[in-house]
Image (tube, helix red, strand yellow):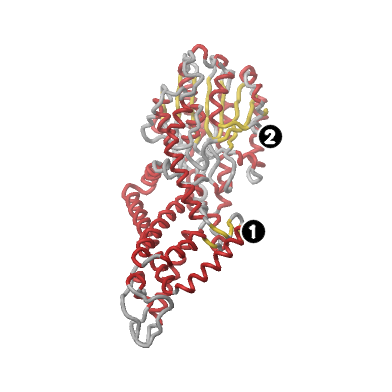
Amino acid sequence: MSFFTRLRREPAPGREPTEGPPVTGEDRPIASDVDRTPGGSARRRLVARGATVLAALLVLFALVAPEQISRLTPGAFTRIPVEGLLGVLLLLFLPARARRVTALVLGAVLGLLTVVKLLDMGFFKVLDRPFDLVLDWILFDDALSVLTDSVGRAGAIGAVVVLVLLVVALLVLMALSVLRLTRVVVRHRTVSARVVTALGAVWVVCAVLGAELAPGLPVAASGAADLAYDRTVQIRAGLRDQETFAAEAAVDAFRDTPGDQLLTGLRGKDVVLAFVESYGRDAVQDPEFAPQVGALLDEGNRRLNAAGFASRSAFLTSPTAGGGSWLAHATLLSGLWINNQQRYSNLLASDRLTLNSAFRRADWRTVAVMPAMTRPWPEGAFYQHQRVYGVGDLGYQGPRFSFAPMPDQYTLAAFERLERAQPDRPPLMAEIPLVSSHGPWAPLPRMVGWDELGDGSVFDSMAREGDPPDVVWRDAARVRTEYRRSIEYSLTSLISYVEKYGDDDLVLVFLGDHQPAPIVTGEGASRDVPITIVARNRTVLDRISGWGWQGGLRPGPQAPVWPMNAFRDRFLTAFG
């Protein structure tokens, strides 16, 4: 940072003074902008100019860079930031001491906004939404856990230290950059005022005409001010969200419903609720995926019909995208819109009736089969599961498949062996998240005969096939291909499970938890996910005939779309 320091000295003899008032105090030239020898130093002048250019580029990035990585194009930086123009005017007319303090404060604020903008870029890339300054901090704890699992505790601590140092460096460099540019502007006061006036006129004209050099990025930019305003509104809404959620949670038509009046239309049935990771609307409607995934679903529907099963399908709108599966699970099961961690924590601290606890109140045995659960899961008590199966409870001795500790086919077979195959048992309600379609979608298992699964060792060779995730993720097209293949595998596992183990008492409800990351769907994709109910007993599907859902395993473009939190009440009403 040495080129950001300054040296107080009088102008060299014979040198013309710069235009404007005498240079004193805080307005003196910075060290690298003056010559240390009578003849000057070309190298020192070059370094000084380079430092000024770097400072200008850093400030320009902070002012006009968009919040999404995909929009970081050259056109995004050929814009006029109104905040920069107003800042120059303010600094030109302030006295020297106030100008220095103001420049440092403006630089620090601009640095903080840049940190927020960088967080937004990451969140848009993964979750297709901006970072929430009130509600998203808790997610860093989960990120640290994932990082620790990946690189170890020492590596995770090192990464956090480096990240903190980078943030501090950004804040300091931004403040020093604004201070440096302020001195340059003040030394050329008249020229600066003329340039700002001309650019201000261009800004007004472009604002009136709505001129754009890059789609969605107007030449007359006000991104930093808009970001500050949006975050102020976001903070206010986040602080009020707890009260809003409490009011929503207080309304529950089924809170006091006796068990003998709940789910009477499903008496004696085993109800399996399977969440298919990242199974979104794009899987069945995007032209890149729909032909293969749709053909698989249509063929599966034909096979299930031949076995006596029927199905109905529609869409639900998830509260999240790209990640945060637990928020979607909680939304569907509780009938409340759980779109952030604060709401999730408040839900777990409540006595809200969930689908799981409704089944338990109605004398079903409630279980959760969690193939990715490697730590204690206190949520099981809230959902009133009588048994929770984690990784260590399922008997799997095969290889991991990237994120997924075991293939979906094995998860379903373990559930069948440990629960449905037990004699003299009550009817079951099982919640089963299927995780083979969780990113990074490579490597992937293949289907094997159900009688060949054993302890999972049959998958050993499959985990070594193909390229590892770090190779696949160098090519966005390959990522999308592997995503499609993972969805096909998970859906095939479910369809084959029903063929193998389905009977008159099985009712399968399967749905996606959220759309995959924007690298698969593109930005701004809908948050809809398919949902399907499969049963052999036609009276079960007759109960939902008024819903208007479409026949078959694949919902079409005109299938009904409900918010995910509407499902609990409609399900309890239809079968109660």
Q: Nearer the viewer, residue 219 or 488?
A: 219
Classify mark 2: helix, strand or loop.
loop
The tag on residue 558 is: 2
Q: Position of residue 395 (x, y in %)?
A: 41, 31
Q: Is residue 459 above or below residue 420?
A: below
Q: Image point 34% across, 75% down: which residue?
A: 31
Q: Image point 67% across, 38% down: which residue?
A: 295
Q: Nearer the viewer, residue 290 or 167?
A: 167
The tag on residue 209 is: 1
Q: Nearer the viewer, residue 537 or 17?
A: 17
Q: Amino acid at mark 1?
A: Leu
Q: CA distance from mark 1 to mark 2?
A: 39 Å
Q: Is residue 477 above or below residue 498?
A: below
Quadrant in the rendering for residue 50: bottom left
The local crowd at label 2, few if under 14, some if 14 to 19, many if 20 or more residues have their Cα within 10 Å, is few
The local crowd at label 1, few if under 14, some if 14 to 19, many if 20 or more residues have their Cα within 10 Å, is few
Left or right, 34 with respect to 212, comes to: left
Q: Amino acid at mark 2?
A: Gln
Q: Is residue 135 above or below residue 100?
A: above
Which of pointers 1 and 2 lies earlier in the amino acid sequence? 1
Q: If the image is split into quadrants, where does the N terminus sit?
A: bottom left
Quadrant in the rendering for residue 375: top left
